[in-house]
Amino acid sequence: MHHFEYKGQKLHAEGVALDKIATKTGTPVFVYSLKTLRRHINAFSEAFSSAPHIICYSVKANSNIAILKTFAREGSGFDIVSAGELYRVVKAGGDSKKVVFSGVGKKVDEIEFAIKKNILMFNAESPEELAAINAVAKRLKKKVAVAIRINPDVNPKTHPYISTGLKKNKFGIETEEAIKQYAYAKSNYKNLDMAGVDCHIGSQITELTPFGDALEKVKDVINRLRKTGTNIRYLDMGGGLGITYKDEAAPHPSNYGTEILKRTAGLGVTLIFEPGRNIVGNAGVLVTRVVYTKQGSLKKFVISDAAMNDLPRPSLYGSYHAIKPVDLRKSAPDEVVDVVGPICESGDFFAHDREISKVTSGELLALMSAGAYCFSMSSNYNSRPRAAEVIVDGKDFHVIRKRETLEDIVRNEVIPAKLFKGAKARKGK
């Protein structure tokens, strides 16, 4: 459920018309619903209220610090994959003791930063990483909690780019090797507390069966480890629960909770979850203005001022985002068009052969389900300033990220004076 709906003839975020925001901030602009964000994070937590658990929102889905602060105030922890994400969590007032650090390529300085911030646990993904964490912890004279990410070889039935639990994926350690690494760490790494088991099989998963299959394999690992004296206290099931972009029948968190709680009854662990898309995906939209329309011999194009640098998912994954007119009064009968951006790439599109309400230049469109992996994956490609971000709270709205300026784009670039000292511009021949 989300709080974007038509009131009269205009599309609103909660109590604010999207055209009002666009007029104030310009376009493109990301708009988030505070009520939706709160509802989603609490619905996920409530699904596990009968068992010890920590919800660690996956920062990579949307890392704006105002959104992180919203979740921190609701009691959420955080799943991070870089020192930069941890810095954002701390800046937002998040509790670092409810942070898990995932990812396959943690650098030494990132490990050190996380240990100094007293995070809850590292999710380690390779033998070399275990050695690196232990070395840093030893130097800092700390003992740190670690889980090994198990690669259970389970097919999550999702896009191959966001599948993470198969043997051919770069993530985690295969089960039998992981068992050996727990034993090795227990004997040799005195600064590691092998406290948990982690398993994350992918993203945008719309069936419960893959989660159940993975969980059964992880339970077997936990039982085997306990028999060897390893005190496993945390089970991190990762994230991955899908949302509805078009017509997917995504499970409700309550159904997911029922399934997981049934299968983990009596296991004696604190459950950790890392939802991202499920929390923020349908809590945001991207509002864009039509710059031009163009009729070709084979297709009609609607050219927007948003582009693949703002919302890259269709270009990366062929992903679907519903496209709605912001003002129904200005729209006309449906027509089939390509909705594209101004970037010099044929891959710069939001929809191919999509039937939408006929629009003309100057009108506003809303790309739905744009809260996750949209702004966080945006860039300055073609030297385009990144969009503004806005959060709506009832009848009020607030800018939570200013639109970048042209000066912002080149702010950190340098022309070395020595490199060009005495040099004259070459004349063309």
Image (spheres, rainbow, N blue to C red):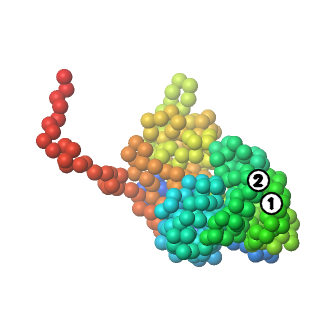
User: x and y percent of residue 210 in the render?
Assistant: 79, 52
- Which quadrant is home to the C terminus? top left
Amino acid type, residue under disc 2 in the picture: Thr
User: x and y percent of residue 125 in the render?
Assistant: 64, 56
N-term mark: 2 or 1: 2
User: In this view of the protein, which residue sits in the foreground, 355 or 127?
Assistant: 127
User: x and y percent of residue 346 in the render?
Assistant: 50, 33
- Which quadrant is home to the N terminus? bottom right
Numbered-mark total = 2
Q: Which residue appears at 42% of the width and 56% of the height?
A: 26
Q: Is residue 331 visible?
A: no
Circle 2 SS class = helix
Left/right placement of residue 227 relative to residue 32 reads: right
Q: Is residue 383 visible?
A: yes
Residue at the spot of label 2: 175
C-alpha separation, residue under disc 2 versus residue under disc 1: 8 Å
Q: Which residue appears at 40% of the width and 51% of the height?
A: 385
Left/right placement of residue 347 relative to residue 275 reads: left
Left/right placement of residue 407 relative to residue 370 reads: left
Compared to residue 151, the image places residue 398 above or below, namely below
Circle 1 SS class = helix
Amino acid type, residue under disc 1 in the picture: Val
Q: Are the residues tagged 2 and 1 within 8 Å (C-beta)? A: yes
Left/right placement of residue 288 relative to residue 320 reads: left
Mark number displayed over residue 221: 1
